Image (tube, grey):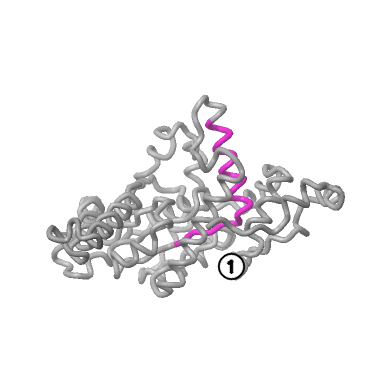
Amino acid sequence: MNPEQLGNDVDARLIFVGGSPRSGTTLVQNMLDCHPDVLGGPEFLHLPDIVSLGKKLHASIDRQWIDLFCSHEEVDEKLRRLCLDFLLPLADRMQARRLSEKTPENVLVFPELARLFPHARFLHVVRDPRAVVASLLEVGRRARQKGLKPAPFTADTQAAIQRVRRSVSKGAQAAREFPDRVMTVRYEDVVLHPERETRAICEFLGLEWTSAMCRPADKPHLGEAAITEKSNELWYDRQSYYRNPEPANLEKWRSRLKALDHLRVIRAFRDDPYLRALGYTLDPGEIPPLTRLFFPVSHLAQRALRKVKPPA
């Protein structure tokens, strides 16, 4: 299938999946990859870099440094074509009508990608921030155990919170600006109700639903090696990568997240209107009982829960 034959709507073939790392983007991508019309490719990684380059080029045009070389419109078209030339040939080789590009960092540039690709669709995967932070910190611990330097946003609690906050904020922005093309997907709903949620995703994407989407572990996926052994099994090993939705694992974060870290996450996200609208109510009443026992007399806990202005 030659993209040029599809005319100006060629970017309608693209599905972008993003969210905070450890929010469930891999599960959603693997479910999409089980659809006969969708290729869930390996993580391309560099769309945020291309968007960043575009911002620099636009700024140089505004300063009249490179305006004789190109216009704003020409920059956008060249970047759009660059992305299409990178992404769609893989879908063509695999004879797939649609390509799903899942890199968690995509969410940080969802608004820019939505403007660059006016016919593409976007899935913003969201998960309880306490579970995300607990999982990010676990990845950091695994890295240190292996003698590796942790990714910055897995190194400590505050860095993990900041990364989750940025991801949620950008996803919320994209959903507000492009409500018809951005779908918010709750990880918990996908795990608890895979058929219902995959049906909703298919309806959003204009695809006919297939039950195979509920069993992503039954099919090999192109991105597996890169995210398992090629990444030192920090994020997944092969067994954890190939698994179907497991409701029993939803509450594991409660035993992994330290009490003070729990309090810090509540402080950071309890007033977020986007998360509250999605049903995430992070209130002090959910603090583990032993922590609540000492909470009234703990100055450290009081300081952790004190409302602070989010960083700009």
* Magenta stretch contains residue 261: no
Nearer to me, 128 or 240 = 128
- In terms of secondary structure, what is the magenta stretch mainly? helix
Where residue 82 appears, x then y in whole percent?
A: 21, 54
In the drawing, does residue 260 fall left or right of residue 107? Answer: right
Is residue 140 magenta-colored? yes
Name which residue type carries label 1.
Leu
Disc 1 element: loop
Start and end of the magenta stretch?
A: 124-143
Question: In the orientation shown, which residue stands out farthest toward the top?
Answer: 147
Q: In the displayed orientation, state which residue is furthest to the bottom.
A: 180
Residue 255 in the image: above or below residue 17: above
Q: Nearer the viewer, residue 233 or 141?
A: 141
**Up-down: is 132 above or below 121?**
above
Query: According to the image, label 1 marks what residue?
Result: 278
The mark total stands at 1
Quadrant of the drawing holding the N terminus: bottom left
Which residue does the image show at 43% across and 57% down from the upper left? 107
Q: Residues within 10 Å of mark 1 (few under 14, many from 20)?
A: some
Judging depth in this view, the residue of 219 and 104 nearest the camera is: 104
Residue 91: image location, x then y, percent? 25, 54
Residue drawn at x 55%, y 50% is 162
Q: Residue at x 19, y 58 (%)?
A: 78
